Amino acid sequence: MLPEVVAGETQALSPTCPDLTALSLYKRSNNLSEAENRIALARADLIRAYMKEKDKAKTAKQSVVKAGMVFIQGYNTGHLLPKVFEVLGKTSFQTVQTWIRKWLDSDCDYTALATQYGNRKGQRKVTEDEFNSALSFALHPNRLRMAEITRLTKMSLQRRGIPTPSHESTIRRALEDWRDTYYDKWVFCREGEKALNDKVLPYLERDAGLLDVGDVLVADGHTLNFQVLHPFTGKPVRMTMVTWYDWASCMPAGWEIMPTENVQCVAASLRRAILTLGKMPKVAYLDNGKAFKAKLFTDKDIDFEETGFYGMFARLGMETIFAWPYNAQSKPVERFFGTFSGIERLMPTFSGTSIQDKPAHLLRNERLHKQMHEKKYGGWVPTVEEADQIIAGWVNEYAGRAHAGLKGLRPRDVFDAGKGPGVDPVALRFLMMSMEIKSVGRNGIHFMGRNYYDVELYGYKRRVLIRYDLEDLSEIYVYDEAGKKEICAARPIQPVHPVAKLTGIKEDMELVKEGIRLKKGLKNGTVKEAREYIGAAPMLVAIPDPQITQIDADFKTLPQAEAEHIEEEAAKMRVLPFPAPEKTWQSDADHYEDCLERECKGEVLPLKEMEFMRAFEQMQEYRDLKGRFEFLRDYWLTEGREKSL
């Protein structure tokens, strides 16, 4: 049997070797690998047993060769030396004789029985020119495949007349050895800095057990891998979910689903996370995305005149930390999103985590899969509210799982144990309101692509401070620039129908009339107050008294008889009518508009004008402008009724 290998232990191999007992045959050799050492010792055991059988035959004066062959046949059955047979397997009489010669030639050194193959591992017969050329192609940023690298290497050297004796597979193995030895250079040259960070560079192992619940909320955006109905367009799209993740408990405290990752989505999800947590978190660990780096959230002490933003996190008493850009290891929430893909795959509208991961019904020419999917789900796409409810149900199930990062505890148990007593929602909303300095224009305050107006802003030209809630933009609160005096609560102006009379509904027409009444009311108020100012205005230049001209003086001195004579002569004169200049218009449309205005205001038009109007109404030009004329007719008629009242 195979003897145990113990340092310093010696055993005799065969009585035919006089110095055998003095040799350290079964010491482990440092020059051999574990496998080579085991094989050499097994061969030594086989030789010892083999030579004993031959000595017995010689003593009994039997055929030594025949005894050796019988022994080998018995060994090959696996029953004679089972332990040795497990290592060496079957062998032959000639092979054993070869091992004996090697052993005797080496002065009974068992290491001579070790296998010889594999001694040149890592030493390729690749020329220096072949290797350097192959390495230049291998480290190209275009990330050539191995087959292309070896083919281009052979082609390049042949064109330059340089010998290339190595086979392509030999060059490939030489490159693979270099890659495994210098993997950092291989990755950086072929894939860049991010791949070097993700695949090669060591990372810090952080102990989340040192944190308490609420110490750090980690936030990041994730594009959902299933479709949701867009709240504005009604089309199915992949929306964005911003999640606030409590690092200590591995629990998603709050999230929000929106079409894009923006400050409104971040603020809404943060409010939900704080209400769930029941206390103000200490640190916000944020992504480097544009929405998270907005000054709205991060600046602590900003001059209103310079930027107009206050730091929301600073008002909440939270410190901010930003993750390294393009570094997934620095954001613990990335691991959660990997687990979150489990619920995404359960959705009927799952679209795949990548192009290669698409479900069958979304692939080209998969008609049967598309029909079966349509038949089973009927084209159902969840709304934002439905998706939110589904995610909430999954989070509830996730919170009850044993978590490896929490040493087998459940996220819900850890989170509930560290929750706060609660936060006042009203006070939280006020703290999270953003502030900004704005100018007031004719239509009020332009903010978030809309105009916010209130009658208190009419005629106000000073800059103002506005407070607004990103989650509820139905109104904004307007203060003076110092923020001490509240002016009003402005609401967004609702645009009116361009041709409400022609294609709009009753409500559209009411909006138009309401806007006209508001404008006239403001104008009348201005005019009324302005009259008093104008009437009280002082005279800037003294106007002299009217002087009696010489003509007037002479006229007054005419004798009575002469004056009567002049009057008689004047009475005899015939007065010739002087025709008034005829009114002109630039076009027939202007002529028709003038006639329409006069008719709506109650003027009786001459027959000629009425005939013109009827003729113009049959022309194509009138049909093109009919909507405008209908609107003007209604406007002038409304104006006339208001004057009569």
Image (spheres, helix red, strand yellow):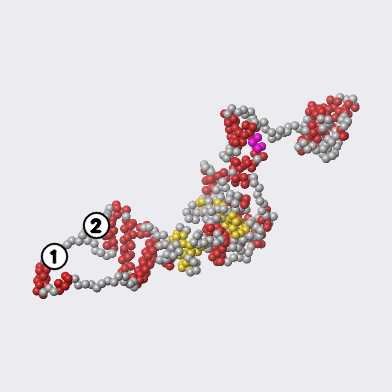
Describe residue 428's horizontal placement relative to residue 568 as left or right: right
Amino acid identity at mark 2: Thr
- With respect to residue 249, does 118 lie above or below? above
Q: Which residues are magenta?
A: 174-178
Main SS of the magenta part reads helix
Please name the residue shown 83% across and 27% down the image: 68
Which label belongs to residue 584? Answer: 2
Which label belongs to residue 252? Answer: none
Q: Secondary structure at mark 2?
A: loop
- With respect to residue 605, does 80 lie above or below? above
Describe residue 180's horizontal placement relative to residue 52 as left or right: left
Describe residue 444's horizontal placement relative to residue 426 as left or right: left
Name the image quarter holding residue 74: top right
Which label belongs to residue 575? Answer: 1
Q: Secondary structure at mark 1?
A: loop
Please name the residue shown 58% across and 66% down the image: 424
Amino acid identity at mark 1: Val
Q: Position of residue 114 (x, y in %)?
A: 78, 33
